[in-house]
Image: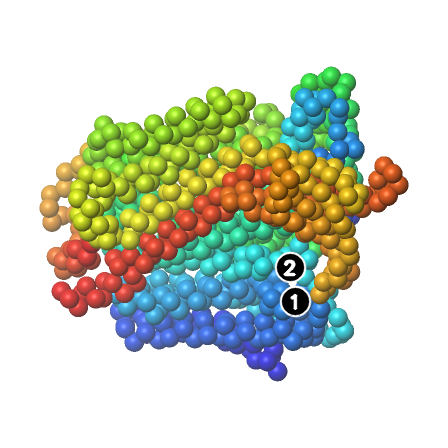
Amino acid sequence: MITEFGAYALVVALVLSALQMVLSAVGGARRMAILAGAGQGAALGAFLCVALTFLALVHAFVVSDFSLANVAANSHTAKPMLYKVAGAWGSHEGSMLLWCLVLTGYGAAMAVYGKALPPRLRAYAVAVQGALGVLFLAYTVFASNPMARLLDVPVEGASLNPLLQDPALAFHPPFLYCGYVGFSVVFSFAMAALIEGRVDAAWARWVRPWTLAAWSFLTVGITLGAFWAYYELGWGGWWFWDPVENASFMPWLIGTALLHSAVVLEKRGALPGWTVFLGLAAFTFSMLGAFLVRSGVLTSVHAFAVDPARGVLLLTIMGIAAGSGFALFALRAPSLNAGGLFAPVSRESAIVLNNIILSTATAVVLVGTLFPLIREAVDGEAVSVGPPFFNMTFVPLMVLAMAVLPAGPLLAWKRGDARLVTRRLWLALACAAILGLVAFAVVAPRSALASAGLALGVWLVGGALLELAERVKAFRAPWAEVRRRATGLPRGAWGTTLAHAGLGLFVLGASFETTWRVEAAQALGVGGQLKLGAYELALTDVGTVEGANYIAERGVVKITRGGAAICTATPERRFYPTGRQTTSEVAICPRALDDLYVVLGERRAGADGQPAWLVRAFVNPWVRLIFLGPLVMALGGLISLSDRRLRFGVAKRAENAA
Amino acid sequence: MRRLLAILAAVACLAGAAADPADRLPDPAQEARARAIFREVRCLVCQNESIDDSEAALAGDLRSIVRDQVKQGRNDSQIRAFLVERYGEFVLLKPPFSPGNALLWATPVVALVLGAVLMIVLLRRRAAPSPAGEDPEALSQAEEARLQVLLKDE
């Protein structure tokens, strides 16, 4: 009954989205507030209906209602409750429903928080958001209905892929989708501005909080995914330049470029066309990501081969949405004002440079991701594009961007003074250079790249801190003055500092981890020992444990350093009988910023005829910074979002005051 | 065939085992070279893993081929050429510089040059002589006032 209700609500949501589109569009075009208001009501209604469907689906997963095809294929009675709930968005159908939920949710937020916007712009934006809702809801209802029933009800479900049964991955999709789909708001605003034919500083200010929110969510989502890969896949890596990872990374890169160019538009009225273009591109890349991941066209072994129709449909939806967006852009872009002028050395120039590099990087990731498809289509040759390619192309681009980054926020708008900036940053530059050289000479004469990475990380963090110090006049003004300035500093400035410093932390972590990682592996019997850098590992016991839906071999590895006990790691090798799959459960002992990472391999016959296990262990130095850095960046985004000037309703209050 | 690959991949691709001491080369320098090559060679039956990471049987075979050749003293490009000869370009995670891969390798350069040109154009603009009041894009007085209210709130 609840299921039928949910399925019905989904159809109602589709109808309401269509109403939202039509009513808002007509209300905007004819300047009829009552129609536009009705459109906003429809937006709220659509969100509520999708939320009902979503709850009904979660309910079906919680009570293990295997009469639903989706539940039968992705759940199991023995699965822990968290993963039953998370199973609701673990499948294709469920994840597209989550997409629709977030999409209509943002539509409802636009209807509720958009009171300060010019009525016409708001009506058009809500209409475009409604059109996107129609496209994706129609896809969900007609091609990928999560509420479809089975005639032949199985007694037990097929369970969720055990690799996905993990807390980080349970929350990964909601964050990722809040980010991906958050760019739909920017897309709708961009379309609305193009329809009206005007893109100005006020528009940039309205768009900024939505971009910040989407970007922050996406940052957290990608970090969770990388963290999951790090501890679940079991070989210590955290980023593989896999097509699915790239799919989520491209919208992030464009979103980052957009955040910066929107500042130029807001403060200086420059780059309107480019900013709108990025606004359209960000959500286009989100849709491309959904297509790549959900159709399985690139990982080659997913649903696409089985069900190409869905992939084609998703591609069609993307074509309609992005196509109309860029067509409108091509039509209106020539009439957009080019905006304020600026000198080669100025904050505008620095941000334009940031945008050029980020766009180039996006192009590299895009072509690298799609190239195997392109090449296959052109001459039938199968090629692979993997980490070595991206390390050789993407990384130098980012190094270039990060080398100039600390100077950006210190440069003045319109015409900056390079000498002044150098004077303010010399301390960070000196620290970075000295540390890099010391590292090069003493610690790692053979790894010049790591020394450069260390220098770059110090340069970024130091630059961010010096910029903050400069703003509050630290060490130059009396303490009271510094405190007054610090409290008076807009939250956006704190956000910038945090985001840039977070990037520096990430660079430090990534350079340390990739260069100074220590690896050891040995087949150990019970009682066997293994040396890992300064640490001693002893396999003291291997026993069998039974989990909720798996059986595991659990090794007990005592880690000591110079005789002193450090910790006891218990890596597991789990067997899930339902899907007949084996996963490896890594044991991680955190040591400040480092991780001791222990993996238990297959049982094999040892030298003395006794059973032995291949134990692999890593010391991953500073690896925590790889995940901490992006979280600091996201925190910066959120703090920036809480800036008084950017709150959704601010213009209204200002208007009342005026 | 794809189905088969999918099943193989699902069964075989677990955590990596390139460091298995049973297979290691006695000479650490040679072993390091072999490991560096592993990272650039794709495990053909896996989704997107190098043979350094993959535990699949085929990855193990490829590793022993590479180790053998390293032991025989062949250089990196000879080994890569051998693998391409045998398995096609698909086996390399970094496609070689070749006419067929021109698009791939040209993208970063072309995009960067394009960006530089755009930036130069942007910087060389002159203030367009537009008499006040004739600019159709200019804000009306009411709009200007509203913008000031918005911007004032800093």
A646 on left or right of B3: left
Q: Chain of mark 1?
A: A
Q: Amino acid at mark 2?
A: Gln
Farthest residue, direction front = A563
Front residue of this view, candidates B22 and B11: B22
Residue A386: where, in percent of width, then height? 60, 36
Q: Secondary structure at mark 2?
A: loop
Residue B148 visible: yes
Front residue of this view, candidates A124 and A618: A618
Q: Upstream in the sequence, badge 2 or badge 1?
A: 1
Farthest residue, direction bottom = A1
Residue that badge 1 annotates: A80
Residue that badge 2 annotates: A165
Query: Label 2: few (<14), some or many (≥20) within 10 Å?
Result: many
Residue A597: where, in percent of width, then height? 62, 44
The answer to whether the residues at label 2 and label 1 have Cβ atoms under 8 Å apart is yes
Determine which quarter of the picture holds residue A35: bottom left
Q: Secondary structure at mark 1?
A: loop
Determine which quarter of the picture holds residue A629: top left
Residue B97, above or below A587 = above
Residue name at image x 34 percent, y 27 percent: A430
Farthest residue, direction top = B73
Q: Quadrant of the C terminus of chain B?
A: bottom left
> What is the spatial separation of the Cα atoms under label 2 and label 1, in whole angstroms?
9 Å
Front residue of this view, candidates B43 and A96: B43
Front residue of this view, candidates A270 and A64: A64
